[in-house]
Image (spheres, rainbow, N blue to C red):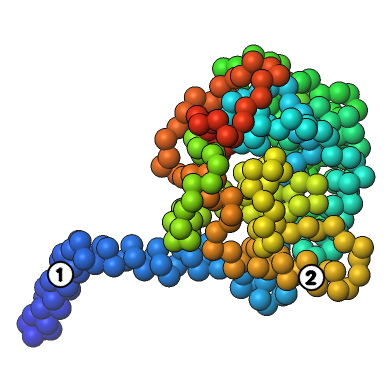
């Protein structure tokens, strides 16, 4: 009995010694750094960045977790630091309903599904065919959910409200209450119709858009790696890009359309064309080290400097990226 107790006692002592030992060991900065390194280098990229690639390698068809669809470059506001670079865009226009639906149709022939489709602009509610566009998009089974983004300056029409009353749809109002005070009224309007609606709490950051900064490949890669926008997939007028800023920089002619930085997803349906698009999508989504546009902006970072939300320019004022002080931002709402 005594021998048994001493043995149990020794075992307990040994266990507590190990506990203290491991605690001490775990607390050493070396091990702490080592675990953080393993997570950063091995686990995080594997889970967050490689998951969709592995999925693609297995199924040979990409799944898009999120996609922004720009349907117009008209807007009711004129934000100096607009993420869609609207103050630099003198050729504002609505994309046609037919083009928008055809582009989604073409895209769905080369991707498996779209998890979350964000409809935005400009101000999406300005588009005259928005109810019809939404109605058609809702019917597509391979789009899981649809978010309509608005700046909260326009009341929706009865026709639009009718279409949006669907469990697949939610409305997100950008919180620009500091520049116009209709947000609450618009919010209540959707709420009254039992449409899922919420405010997007925004933080804005300066991206410092400017003419080419003449960065080296290594610098561009560093910027791209750190930038949170590099997975903000965007579709505008048949042009599929990795990042909304890159899309608009190319659209206003500031950055050349460099092959590999975008995919023209419009096609006639032939097998060869679909194969070509799939190849280009694979390259853009999974093999890109940086975009040409990263030489014209400073990127968007989690810990970047924030600036006031939606600072306004007088309506009708346009900026030029050649201006020494031209700057750009995006919101992360
Ligand atoms: S950031 Fe401002 S100007 Fe740009 S689309 Fe949104 S509301 Fe319009
Ligand atoms: S650095 Fe600029 S262009 Fe490059 S991914 Fe980020 S936001 Fe887009």
User: Of circles 1 and 2, which is in front?
Assistant: 2
Q: Is residue 95 left or right of residue 300?
A: right
- The disc at residue 276 is 2
Whether residue 170 is situated above or below residue 194 in the rendered picture: below
Quarter holding residue 120? top right
- The disc at residue 125 is none
Q: Secondary structure at mark 1?
A: helix
Q: Residue at x 72, y 67 (%)?
A: 280
Q: Secondary structure at mark 2?
A: helix
Whether residue 140 is situated above or below residue 125 in the rendered picture: below
Q: Residue at x 40, y 63 (%)?
A: 40
Crowd tier of the residue under label 1, counting other residues whose Cα lies within 10 Å: few below 14, some 14–19, many 20 or above: few
Q: Residue at x 78, y 32 (%)?
A: 92
Crowd tier of the residue under label 2, counting other residues whose Cα lies within 10 Å: few below 14, some 14–19, many 20 or above: some
Query: Which image quadrant: the C terminus?
Result: top right
Task: Give x and y (percent) for residue 182.
Answer: 68, 16
Spatial CA distance of label 1 from label 2 is 58 Å
Whether residue 300 is situated above or below residue 281 in the rendered picture: above
Task: Give x and y (percent) for residue 116.
Answer: 71, 49
Task: Give x and y (percent) for residue 291.
Answer: 58, 56
Q: Is residue 11 left or right of residue 274?
A: left
Task: Give x and y (percent) for residue 206.
Answer: 49, 35
- Residue ID for mark 1: 21
Q: Earlier in the sequence, mark 1 or mark 2?
A: 1
Quick check: is the Cβ at mark 1 less than 8 Å away from ligand 2? Answer: no
Task: Using the image as rendered, state which of residue 238 and residue 33 is in the foreground.
Answer: 238
């Amino acid at each position: 009995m005594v021998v048994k107790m001493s043995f149990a006692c020794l075992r307990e002592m040994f266990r507590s010694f190990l506990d203290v030992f491991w605690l001490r060991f775990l607390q050493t900065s070396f091990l702490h750094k080592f675990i953080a390194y393993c997570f950063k280098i091995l686990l995080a990229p594997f889970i967050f960045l490689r998951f969709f690639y592995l999925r693609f390698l297995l199924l040979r068809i990409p799944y898009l977790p999120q996609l922004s669809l720009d349907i117009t470059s008209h807007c009711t506001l004129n934000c100096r630091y607009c993420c869609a670079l609207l103050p630099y865009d003198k050729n504002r226009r609505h994309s046609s309903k037919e083009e928008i639906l055809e582009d989604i149709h073409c895209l769905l022939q080369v991707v498996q599904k779209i998890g979350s489709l964000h409809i935005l602009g400009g101000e999406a509610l300005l588009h005259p065919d928005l109810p019809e566009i939404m109605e058609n998009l809702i019917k597509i089974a391979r789009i899981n959910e649809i978010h309509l983004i608005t700046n909260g300056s326009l009341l929706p029409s009865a026709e639009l409200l009718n279409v949006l009353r669907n469990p697949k749809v939610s409305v997100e109002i950008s919180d620009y209450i500091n520049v116009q005070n209709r947000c609450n009224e618009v919010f209540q309007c959707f709420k009254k119709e039992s449409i899922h609606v919420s405010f997007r709490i925004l933080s804005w950051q300066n991206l410092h858009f400017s003419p080419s900064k003449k960065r080296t490949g290594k610098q561009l890669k560093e910027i791209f790696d750190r930038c949170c926008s590099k997975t903000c997939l965007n579709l505008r007028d048949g042009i599929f890009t990795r990042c909304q800023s890159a899309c608009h920089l190319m659209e206003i002619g500031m950055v050349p359309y460099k092959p590999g930085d975008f995919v023209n997803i419009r096609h006639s349906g032939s097998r060869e064309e679909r194969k070509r698009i799939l190849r280009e999508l694979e390259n853009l989504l999974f093999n890109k080290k940086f975009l040409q546009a990263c030489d014209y902006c400073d990127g968007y970072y989690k810990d970047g400097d924030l600036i006031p939300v939606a600072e306004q320019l007088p309506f009708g004022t346009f900026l030029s990226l050649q201006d020494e002080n031209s700057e750009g931002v995006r919101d992360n709402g």
